Image (cartoon, rainbow, N blue to C red):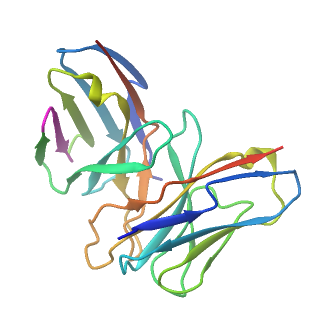
Amino acid sequence: NAGVTQTPKFQVLKTGQSMTLQCAQDMNHNSMYWYRQDPGMGLRLIYYSASEGTTDKGEVPNGYNVSRLNKREFSLRLESAAPSQTSVYFCASSDYRGLNSPLHFGNGTRLTVT
Amino acid sequence: ELKVEQNPLFLSMQEGKNYTIYCNYSTTSDRLYWYRQDPGKSLESLFVLLSNGAVKQEGRLMASLDTKARLSTLHITAAVHDLSATYFCAVGSYGGATNKLIFGTGTLLAVQP
């Protein structure tokens, strides 16, 4: 049982380039999330999706777009990367039937923008 | 707007000692979570606290929740080196059909032999 799988694990971009971070979960969870982690700032919510077909902004959505492709997959796109988007990105999922259930996290994507 | 503060940010402990990490949050919530993160790794769920006065224990770690004070604590008893990690608290944010969590800044715990 893989849980939450993120690809790629590492990525280096130049300023202005675009890329899509992929996330897939095999736990039949309804809700999915994208967080970024920066030193001294904890994790900050970028976007989330309550269910297939819906997405909402989190704390720091500027510069990002998301797509909930189906129940399993939730992608994060950087249209024009900036050095301020250098971070570790985590995807997570949770079970809607238990609103209080903890989030399950992927292993992260380490992104550097030069 | 929900804000979550943790302190201390960094904690250096000797093995065998006790200490407490504090997590304060700014608005009403009825669910609080503690996570552990090892260097370069993902986050692992430790505790889920869902009501005022809730207390959960696992090994040398004990978490509690006071919703009236908007405070949770993570108490470490007789620390061992294996507990070295970063610990995050996260608070559930009302609204929508999701378990949207707002995280604290984390506490880096270093247990020295």
Between A13 and B33, the one nearer to me in the picture: A13
Q: Which residues are magenta?
A: B59-67
In the picture, measured across the screen, residue A77 lies left or right of residue B95, that is right
Up/down of A30 relative to A111, above or below: below
Up/down of A114 relative to A20, above or below: above
In the picture, measured across the screen, residue B108 lies left or right of residue A20, that is left
Up/down of A29 relative to B15, above or below: below
Between A57 and B19, the one nearer to me in the picture: B19
In the rendered view of the protein, which quadrant contains the N terminus of chain A? Answer: bottom left
Residue B4 painted magenta: no
Per the picture, the main secondary structure of the magenta-coloured stretch is: strand
Query: What's the residue at 56%, 62% (across, down)?
Result: A58
Up/down of B10 relative to B99, above or below: above
Query: What's the residue at 39%, 72% (across, down)?
Result: B98
Instruction: Pick out the residue farthest to the front.
Output: A1
Q: Position of residue A94 (x, y in %)?
A: 36, 70
Q: Position of residue A67 (x, y in %)?
A: 63, 78
Between A8 and A57, the one nearer to me in the picture: A8
Between A82 and A104, the one nearer to me in the picture: A104
